[in-house]
Image (cartoon, grey):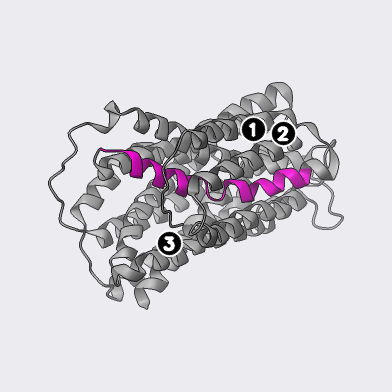
Amino acid sequence: MRAYIFIAVTFFLCGLCTVLNTILAPYLQQVLHLSYTSVTSIYISFYLAYFLLAPVSGYLFRKGNYLMGIRIALLLCTFGTYLIFMGGTYNSFPLVLGGLFVMACGISILQVNANPYVLHLGSSETSSSRLSFLQGFFALGTVVAPFVGSFFILSSLYHPVDGSLLDEILDILPIQKPYFTLSMTWGLIFLLSEIFPLPQVTGLTEKKETATQHPLKLGIVWLGMLVIALAVGVEVTLGNYIIPLLVDRSIMNLNIDMAGHLAMIYWLGFMIGRFSSSVFLKDVEPKVVLYYHAIGGIVLSLAACFATGIFAATAALATGLCVSILFPILFAIILQECPASQMQVSGYMMMANVGGGLVPLMQGLSADSLGVHLSFIIPALCFSVILLFSLRKPKLVKVTI
């Protein structure tokens, strides 16, 4: 039981820290007067870590010493969030970016090692249900993050008495409190993992590979990296640009604090979609589920792009349901169809998470040139590529989310 609580808390913090970026970005944009393109450096710093740390994570996974990998990840998360706290103290945007990179290194290593660790904690018959349940705490963290960020960070943009938008804020001190708390929490979890013994498990003995082809010589791997990069990217960019859309005068004309609270609906849809899809995927082909989620994403993104008022806002918030199952289904389909080593392929798919930095950059460029409203054409294009991918996959794949 102790190990399950430990993993559940770490997954929750991973989700919280990841989605807190969507609050941090509009806040720093407002305070530091950054363009949409410049503020995407937050996402590039974060998701670049996934690209660079995949080989290290794969090494730790192959060795099978999962607890060692998890503890290293906890230390990186502690140090990374502390660097962000120091960035707020010294009003340093580069220091904040450095902290985000270090924190993301920890989260990427944690995800690679914690998932197989959970699978080895009990019988193989119940491994899928254990992992599915514990992954739900990551989704729970994504729901809580907008509320936490809006309360501690975005609310500082407004006058405490009359609620009016402050004319000028000279520092980024408000980010100190949440990130210092997160740093202490990560550090406490690390200390508790050292004080109270956790079950030590080892990875499966590696078998001699029967695959003769290097993964990068296979078209499915390159195509898989593309669609996973787009899937992660569209999830991140929608979560980020929903707040500027709600603030837009032609849409809802909300203040940024209220928009941050409403953004929680997007992540709530993400969590609901993740949990509910694990039920109907038992009876429906994953490629069919992927097809309809991509169609829904295209329609809703175009509605957010070309509609106005509450209809556009509702469409944008509803996209959380559409992105909820993209990554796990795509990941399973690619592993199922690729004849190369699944260990190697998984590493390359992990590197594709860098799309979480690239797609927001594309939408940022569009927002600066066309406006945030029309920039939602970028998510529609991402969903379109995923739709084409779903049409070419004939195989039935069992997926556990």
Q: Distance from label 1 to label 2 (Cα)?
A: 6 Å
Residue depicted at 41% across the width and 49% down the height: 397
How far across and down, in percent of the image, does residue 256 sit?
75, 46
Assess disc 2: are there few (<14), some (14-19) or many (≥20) residues with their C-alpha within 10 Å of its C-alpha: many
Q: Are marks 1 and 2 in contact (CB under 8 Å)?
A: yes
Q: Residue 380: which numbered mark, if any? A: 1
Which tag, 1 or 2, sits closer to the chain's start?
Answer: 2
Which tag, 3 or 1, sits closer to the chain's start?
Answer: 3
Magenta highlight: main SS: helix
Is 351 situated above or below 109?
above
Horizontally, residue 264 falls left or right of residue 352, namely right
Assess disc 3: are there few (<14), some (14-19) or many (≥20) residues with their C-alpha within 10 Å of its C-alpha: many
Amino acid beneath label 2: Leu
How far across and down, in percent of the image, does residue 388 sit?
53, 31
Horizontally, residue 51 falls left or right of residue 45, namely left
Q: Distance from label 3 to label 2 (Cα)?
A: 40 Å
Amino acid beneath label 1: Ala
Q: Can residue 336 be found in the magenta stretch?
A: yes
Horizontally, residue 263 falls left or right of residue 203, namely right
Is 7 situated above or below 265?
below
How far across and down, in percent of the image, does residue 80 sit?
43, 49
Q: Secondary structure at mark 1?
A: helix
The part of the chain drawn in magenta is 313-339
Residue placed under numbered mark 3 in the picture: 186
